[in-house]
Amino acid sequence: MVPFSDIDQAYQRIQHLIVKTPLLTSDRLNDKLGFRLFIKAEPLQRTGAFKFRGACNAILSLEDADQPVIAFSSGNHAQAVAFVARLTGRKATIIMPQDAPEAKIAATRDYGADVVLYDRYTESREAIGKEIAEQQNGALIKPYDHEAVIAGQGTIGIELTDQIKAQGLSPQAVFCCTGGGGLISGLAISLHHSHPELAIYAAEPHNFDDVRRSLEAGTIISNDPEARSLCDAIVTPCPGTITFPIMKAHLAGGVAVTDEEALQAMQTCWRYLKLVVEPGGAVAVAAALQQAKETPSHLAGQDVIAVATGGNVDDVIYQNALTMEGAF
Amino acid sequence: MVPFSDIDQAYQRIQHLIVKTPLLTSDRLNDKLGFRLFIKAEPLQRTGAFKFRGACNAILSLEDADQPVIAFSSGNHAQAVAFVARLTGRKATIIMPQDAPEAKIAATRDYGADVVLYDRYTESREAIGKEIAEQQNGALIKPYDHEAVIAGQGTIGIELTDQIKAQGLSPQAVFCCTGGGGLISGLAISLHHSHPELAIYAAEPHNFDDVRRSLEAGTIISNDPEARSLCDAIVTPCPGTITFPIMKAHLAGGVAVTDEEALQAMQTCWRYLKLVVEPGGAVAVAAALQQAKETPSHLAGQDVIAVATGGNVDDVIYQNALTMEGAF
């Protein structure tokens, strides 16, 4: 439903606004892993997460240049929509969970959006979003089940294709942090366009591994509504109805990591890559590190890519990550 | 003494080995500063600091392909020389102060070097280095008073010239962390080759502002040997005899920052840039932030560049940085 040409057009549309984020590696970490790990550093994207890409493409694709925009998000999509709205001179209203990280709520307000808080466990963000969109005659920019958003996120794959060639890599596996699946859907379409043989894996938090389980079952399975995770950026209820068929067609499977492994991966990114990553943004790196601890690792000797998706994190959680035992 | 052509040749020599580090900015931080701050992100360089550039150029310039190399360094030059030695199949012996950050000693050993520890306050690293170099018939790769090292560090200026053009910037001021002056000398020669009007400032720790004071006096002035600073990477005794005349010819002056301001700058880089920076590597950012607090700031409305030079830091110091009050 999202052809590669949509991603290519998205790239033409947003290329002047986005950062072509670097693909980082650490010689010293690679020695310890036994394979070469390349990290696509989306914390260095504008607003601190890949979400800026999808928000840019979706908002720049709207026909009415003054239409207000509305979004619901735990924080990264929120900041992205708020900032793109400001860049394009629109009003933005963002619906955020009360328990979103303070850093994300503060940043969204800094970008000039109206923030509406709701209770993640008792209220429906979809219902609130729909009501505000109707009141304002605004455009609801959904975080993942939205074709222009998926196409925007897919521009990471265009950059990666270019970087794989420029850096002379031969990747066999790609890990990508996955919530509702918007990013990995766009990424898989664009990467498989250039590298059809690549094994692409969804990396998810323990108890929020709905994509992994849905792929195994062949049908959409939801997470336990009682489940909790530190990885606020990607604790979505279930795969999207647009994203799931794409993921089913493209993904090799899923890997679940614990909160502890996500925190260890944050520490590893701090120590070796000098990159600040949030828990949900570190899950793909954590999945690759998990495989490195297998003996023998099936990744041994390979070039492996992990997409680090965001770096918007509160300091207390970051300090916990730095003091975790057992990190590389 | 180091013509631009040496830097250009250094770039041809090492370009395939170094990372072209990104020039990062934060829309949200810039709003708060009242000017646009662009950070050259050398923590993302191989070995986590710019020192890799100079070590590469100096070691690749040696005539004997098997000659052992010796270096003295508090840690970043150490890691760089150790790693370049490994890449080129040479033996490396590194003389490091006993009180160097553990992370730096561990990394230097990881890169395969022999590490010799000494007392920074009672022993002479120059004398120890000279003795080992004579024993091994090795090449001593000095950290800053060395023309091939200066030329290698100057490659940052070639990249910056390219990035200033590609990103459409009009910089008026550049701040650069300064110890013995190797980096800022190379940087100033190459940046003034493309942008002769640029005001380039040495950023130094309080009590180690020997470059600032030497520039004002017109002659080399040393720091108080009793002085102490958190900024281990740049606590050198005085400007170099090769670097001082270059700095005198090129620099607009110096700015001193406190340890507290360096820690605040580390926090600012963490929050807004998602970049891990060590105390000595954050001093240039701290200098720019110090100017932002002036009312009115003479940088208001400008494009300002700060070179963040390294990111090799122990976790306890990093946690202190995250909890500092008063940061942007």
Image (cartoon, coloured by chain):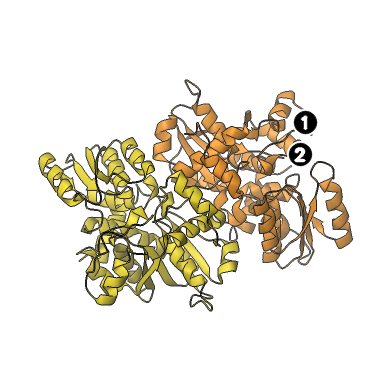
Chain colours: A yellow, B orange
Q: In the picture provided, is A246 more to the left or to the right than A67? A: right
Q: Earlier in the sequence, mark 1 or mark 2?
A: 1
Q: Is residue A234 visible?
A: yes
Q: Residue B253 sits in which quadrant? A: top right
Q: Which residue is mark 1?
A: B224
Q: Residue B47 sits in which quadrant? A: bottom right
- Say which mark, if any, is on residue A150: none
Q: Residue at x 67, y 40 (%)?
A: B185
* Mark 1 and mark 2: Cα distance apart in space: 16 Å
Up-down relation of residue B243 to residue A26 (above or below): above
| Place of residue B264 in the rendered image (x, y in percent of width and height, measured from the top left) | 54, 36
Q: Is residue A163 visible?
A: no
Q: Residue at x 82, y 60 (%)?
A: B138
Between tags 1 and 2, which lies in front?
Answer: 1
Q: Amino acid at mark 2?
A: Gly
Q: In the picture provided, is B14 more to the left or to the right than A120? A: right
Q: In the picture provided, is A118 more to the left or to the right than B57? A: left
Q: Chain of mark 1?
A: B
Q: Chain of mark 2?
A: B
Q: B50 or B78: which is nearer to us?
A: B78
* Mark 1 neighbour density, 10 Å: few (under 14) some (14–19) many (20 or more): few
Q: Residue furthest front?
A: A226
| Place of residue B242 in the rendered image (x, y in percent of width and height, measured from the top left) | 76, 40
| Place of residue B201 in the rendered image (x, y in percent of width and height, measured from the top left) | 61, 32
Up-down relation of residue B22 to residue B29 (above or below): below
Q: Which residue is mark 2?
A: B240
Q: B208 or B211: which is nearer to us?
A: B208
